[in-house]
Image (spheres, rainbow, N blue to C red):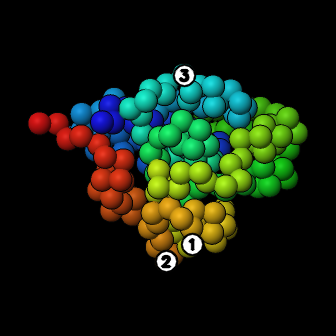
Amino acid sequence: MVKRVIYIHGFNSSEKSYKAVRFGELMANYDVDYCVPRLNHEPLQAILQLEHLLTPDTALLGSSLGGFYATYLSQRYNLRAAVINPAVAPFNLLAPLIGRNYNPYQDYHYELNTSHINALKALYVPKLTSPELLYLLQQTGDEVLNYQHAINYFSQCKQLVEFGGDHSFVGFERTVNSIVEFLKLPKIN
């Protein structure tokens, strides 16, 4: 039985993202420990932060780069995960951003370099070994990521694909019941 849910935010985001906060509000009806860590921009540090929070009864919810991390952790530790407009190969997307960056949600400057890109490549799962543990929520209007990459990569997984929308996943609240059901979250008695 799931006792902890970890929300994994995306690149240049924070624990205060709309989906993280809104899902947390809805978790008040469930008997789970809900965690939303503020992740380091360095991929290996972010994974270590997340691994430190994992228990065998953890489920994951990740958005964008957080979906990439959730996929890696799901397959490595045999955990259920829902991924929202996930980055499939973020090393390709972030390579052009090498250099000085600013995270406005965490209010700090940092340097993105080739070691970060290489770390993301090392975390890539080329073939999903347990696709039944993953639930893809994808909108075709995602202006940041190519939605077809996710649909193809997660082809053997449960999928909810909606026409239109955007990278933020418009109407996220409509999907919460299906996420809760997939993650098998226990309601408070």
Q: Position of residue 55 (x, y in %)?
A: 44, 26
Residues under labels 2 and 1: Cα distance? 7 Å
Number of other residues with Cα within 10 Å of mark 2, as a class: few under 14, some 14 to 19, many 20 or more: few
Relative to 89, is 58 above or below? above
Can you give x and y, in whole percent of width and height, for residue 91 in the image?
78, 49
Residue matched to label 3:
52
The spot of residue 36 in percent (x, y) is 46, 33
Q: Is residue 32 above or below residue 138?
A: above
Which x, y percent locates residue 78? 50, 40
The kind of residue on which mark 1 rests is Gly
Identify the residue under disc 1: 141
Q: Look at label 3 and name its amino acid.
A: His
Report the side of 130 relative to 57 (left or right). right
Task: Name the quadrant containing residue 41.
Answer: top right
Q: Image height check: is 51 above or below 122?
A: above
- The quadrant in which residue 152 appears is bottom right
Q: Decide if residue 9 is in sight here.
A: no
Instruction: Report the Cα–Cα distance between label 1 and label 3.
Output: 35 Å
Please state, as top left, top right, bottom left or bottom right, where the C terminus lies in the image: top left
Q: CA distance from mark 3 to mark 2?
A: 37 Å
Q: Residue furthest left?
A: 189
Question: Image point 62% across, 48% down: which residue?
Answer: 68
**Label annotation for residue 163:** 2
The mark lying in front, picked from 1 and 3, is 3
Tag 3 near tag 2, CB within 8 Å: no
Q: Earlier in the sequence, mark 1 or mark 3?
A: 3
Determine if residue 129 is in view. yes
